[in-house]
Amino acid sequence: MSVPAAGGWGRSVAVITWPFRHGLRVPGGRLIGQVYAHGAGLVAAKAAHCAALGEVRMTMALADDSQASVSAAARLSGVHYQVRGHSVFKDLNLSIERGKITAIMGPSGTGKTTLLRLITGQLQPDQGQVSVDGVDLAALKTDQLYALRQRMGMLFQNGALLTDLDVYENVAFPLREHADLPESLVARIVLMKLQAVGLRGAARLMPSELSGGMARRIALARAIVMDPKILIYDEPFAGLDPIAMGVVLRLIRNMNQALGLTSIVVSHDVQEITALADTVYLLSEGRVVASGAPASLHNSQDAMVRQFLTGGEEGPVPFHYPAADYLQQMLSQEVPQ
Amino acid sequence: MSVLVDWLEMLAEQVRQWGRFSIFTARLFAVTPRALLRFRLIVEQLNNTGARSLVIIMLSGLFVGMVLGLQGYDLLRRFGSTEALGTAAALGLLRELGPVVTALLFAGRAGTSLTSEIGLMSATDQLAAMEMMAVDPIRRVCAPRFIGGVLAMPLLAAIFGLLGILGAYLVGVVIMGVDSGQFWSQMRSSVELKDVVEGIVKSVAFGLACSSIAVFEGYYAVPTAEGVGRATTRTVVVSSVAILALDYMLTAALL
């Protein structure tokens, strides 16, 4: 069964019901199947409502269909970026392929989160170009950038849930801000997203009552509530127990497949990324030092790649921070300045 | 030489800070009309900044009025005109003490709360998350808090003045024995509308200053525990100086 041409909403219904259409049997599953069956109606309602609101926000040529011809969902060309005189990126070039899961890996402090902030337009490069869907971010005005961001979702390292709102309101937040939908429709969309991450029962909990893994999943539900085309994950596995890590990993994979998303995952969890990503970029000292399929990186003989993948102490990334001669410093008995 | 360089760097930083504040307040004012439409958010912030400051404002108003009653009675007794106590207390509270003390208390109670709340939202990536959801944090977070503060200040100053007059009455009339009729009649005959307006103008100005400083410091707080702590302290210090400087200027202009 397929949902009629309905853009993001059709994909949304498809992903919510995906587990149930692939054999998952849980209480309420039938109801969700029925929602899917009536997906066309729901989608039509949303479409009609949006049309009625004149919700055409894009003020420039960001048309969905024309972008399909642009192969890269995001591209960084010759990017230089400095923070307080310290160079974070030096002539960085990379391309995020549409519809794939791309992982950005690298030792701590290599600017992985900074890279995400460049892709989302929260930071501007000192030199070079960052483009998303073929559009140079530097050429966009604030409202155009915000319009573009409505097509992107981001999962922050700590979830970044709004602490004064409960789970339900957190997930409903983008809908309330961007679409004047009837409360009954908001409720259905929010509950569907929460069901997709397995936390429909936690709708009325406050963020302070959630575990780290639950907060991450709620943040994921919020990130997909506007049916984005690009989903960005900043360290989605950091600080999670193995069960929560497995849940988040499966969610990322399933979301990407069912929604046809482009996913960008920043992480240094080698095993998880190997299992998840289509393409990996390994960053070090502001440049891409290796890229390709995870398997090809495992076969690499490059010293930096080997050290990173095996977690070795010896290699291009030194254990010791640059310092004066150890013996000399110990003998001099001077207090470090 | 290095002292001169340090001094110049400090000056340059102050100029940068003024520039940031000017741009921030311009953005704040620009989004205020749209933020006014979000009535529920403003009511929430009126509750946060106004209603939750009521106890401290009422208690302070009562005690300030009682001190004013006591000092005023002692002073006026020397000139044999204790019946003017009502006028003295009302003018002092409406024109000066009410707006100024309310604003100082507001900066300490609500201003610090606004700064630390916004600063912590920034430190925990909540503001960045809003930007990623294509929601302007200045419009969604700062503007309702700013408007709530500006609306709350004159209301709190009025309540402060009311409780202050009650405190002066308690001390002057009930304890010191000033004639009740003279206390109220002298007050009614001497206090004019322009005195009330002066108090309202001052409290609105203080509300604009305190609220914008509090949200600015929170928004630009360094996103660490130490940074938020410093920003909170700066809110109290900068707001207090701004209130007293503005008070002098407004008094000179409105006299």
Image (tube, coloured by chain):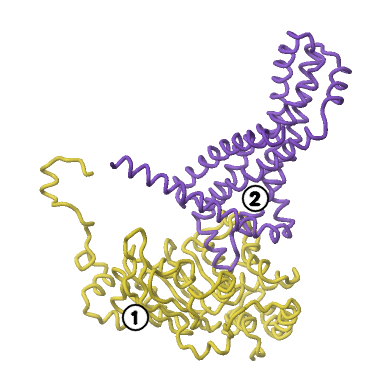
Chain colours: A yellow, B purple
Q: Which residue is disc 1 drawn over?
A: A294
Crowd rating for badge 2 (residues with CA inside 10 Å; few <14, some 14–19, many 20+): many
Q: Is residue B93 above or below residue A162?
A: above
Q: Nearer the viewer, mark 1 or mark 2?
A: 2
Name the kind of residue labelled 2 in the image.
Phe
For residue B97, side relative to residue B181 (left or right): left
User: Measured from the top left, where is residue A130 in percent x and y?
Assistant: 44, 76
Query: Helix or strand or loop: what does disc 2 sit on?
Result: helix
Q: Which residue is disc 2 drawn over?
A: B146
Instruction: Report in which chain the residue with disc 1 lies.
Output: A
Q: Is residue A329 above or below residue B134?
A: above
For residue A160, side relative to residue A331 (left or right): right
Quick one: A135 or A218, which is closer to the camera?
A: A135
Quick one: A105 or A332, which is closer to the camera?
A: A332
Looking at the rendering, in which quadrant would you find the C terminus of chain B?
top right
Instruction: Report in which chain the residue with disc 2 lies.
Output: B
Looking at the rendering, in which quadrant would you find the N terminus of chain B?
top left
User: Measured from the top left, where is residue A6 in percent x and y?
Assistant: 66, 86
